[in-house]
Amino acid sequence: MRILGINALFHDPAAALVIDGRTVAAAEEERFSRRKHGKRPLPFSAWELPELAAAWCLKRAGLRPQDVDAVAYSFDPALARPADAMGLDDPWDHLRLTYAREAPGFLRTALPGLDPGAVRFVPHHMAHAASGAFAAPDAGDCSVLVLDGRGERASHLAARRVGDRLEPLHAQDLPHSLGLVYEELTEHLGFLRSSDEFKVMALASHGTPRMLPELRRHVYPTGDGGFHATGVPWHELCAPRRPDEPWSRDHADVAASAQAVLEETLLDLVRWLHGRTHDRVLTLAGGVALNCVANSRVAREGPFSRVWVQPAAGDAGTALGGALLLSAGAGDEPEPMTGADLGRDWSDAELGAWLKTAAVPFERPADIAATVARTLADNGVVAWFQGRGEYGPRALGHRSLLAHPGHAGNLERLNDVKGREQFRPVAPMVLADRAAEIFDGPLPSPYMLFVHDVAPAWRDRVPAVVHVDGTARVQTVDAAREPLVARMLGEFERLTGLPVVVNTSLNTAGRPMVDDPRDALECFGSSPVDLLAIGPYAV
């Protein structure tokens, strides 16, 4: 079966293609349109489709729209209720439902030749759940927990994978939503809602959870696999912050308190789920699963032996999950993900042609990995553009900015390069077989979705990647799967004695991650970056 997955309704529109159970391609629309998150999550934008991403997925497989057997659209309007009936203040939500119902016709227009009768509405949280349970490697029968802002009428799903089926166990109805509570705080703190929640997580490390008792009155588990999460009086806890003003101690403390109550509630949900399934493996999906601090606490204190998080845990991942769910239902055994590098790539010849057209001076060194390692050892900043683009929000060694971790000033330097807040950390990249001697936490960690305590003996050696609380969001590198990155890390260690390199996303604030060669050249030309390593070429 050839199944195209589509996420479109709320935010992070994306497309994925699954053929006979194998994920062939997956990409977010923002990487093509260059609009951060593809669009704003407003009812008025719900009609917008990931048409560029979808067309590319089909092209990657040499398919035409009429060759597709089914299209999985990751929202089922038949399950939805009016917003006011769910206790939500969203007077234009009915537009979303209208656009969802008309999605088959919209898709036929966007992808000429597509049969609108091939479109299948997949429940939003089931698509999230499938993106975890069916994509996780070596999971077998496993538990899955989904938490986000909202779906059709719920904000949470606890389920279990049994063979090629997903069995729902419990869902939390709206308006109770851990995701929406966190979004509300994001807006209260002057950040962009449904976009900047990770900034709240970073800010939380600078505060103390002194407001936790008050928050527990509004956010708490109910003991039956669900939770209460609504009505938090943010204005009573601290004054709102304007986007252009500095953060205060109160702002950091309310962020720390919200992070703590999220973690407490999540742990209760995880323990309830394990009590029902007694599985060894837990998979996580939904936007809340991008909270790597909470993920680490679940892995450390929860009852499951292993926790796996979908790297595209936000709504973009429902494109893949919806396609995997339909594929499994059609009898195709879903194959696990082997990596997040599911996007576009270019041949060496194509990259060389781009550079010649741009008329920039470049060379082709004998080994681009060694050239990059030398530049990093000399404390240069490198833009690293290699292989297929990543699916999801993390740069994982394909579209990255790299730097020397041994200079504490490189944190401020990179935040300046990217034009972002100085309280935000950057991440370490390390070979998987070296990680345990430096970082304590869930390993391996290939998708940068957990935080790890940095060993005291290493904190002064790699200060650029150590957050204010002594942790780091680690990416481990499998040398067999990422030989070029591994070679660069090995050469850097030979030159510096450090097996770690700073890795952050190749973009500037408010812009999507770089995806194609033009994006790479534009970012390189407009930023104080010393070297662009694009394929085998050094610019």
Image (cartoon, rainbow, N blue to C red):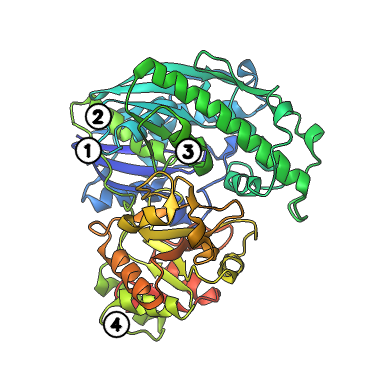
SS label for mark 2: loop
Q: Is residue 315 visible?
A: yes
Residue 140 has which mark?
A: 2
Badge 1 vs badge 3, beta-carbon distance below 8 Å = no
Q: Does residue 167 appear to the left or right of 37 in the view shown?
A: left
Q: Amino acid at mark 2?
A: Gly
Q: Amino acid at mark 4?
A: Arg
Considering only order in the chain, which callout, 3 or 4, is on the residue closer to the N terminus? 3
Q: Nearer the viewer, residue 388 or 455?
A: 455
Tell me where residue 309 sits by quadrant: top left
SS label for mark 3: helix
Q: Nearer the viewer, residue 471 or 360?
A: 471
* Residue at x-position 58% and y-position 60%: 509
- Can you identify the residue that label 1 sits on? 335
Badge 1 vs badge 4, beta-carbon distance below 8 Å = no
Please provide percent x and percent y for residue 307: 38, 35
Tell me the CA gap for discs 2 and 4. 45 Å
Reply above or below: 389 against 411. Answer: above
Q: Residues within 10 Å of mark 1 (few under 14, many from 20)?
A: some
- Can you identify the residue that label 3 sits on? 295
The nearer-to-camera label among 2 and 4 is: 2
Tell me the CA gap for discs 4 and 3. 41 Å
Q: Does residue 165 appear to the left or right of 362 in the view shown?
A: left
Residue 364 has which mark?
A: 4
Q: Amino acid at mark 1?
A: Glu
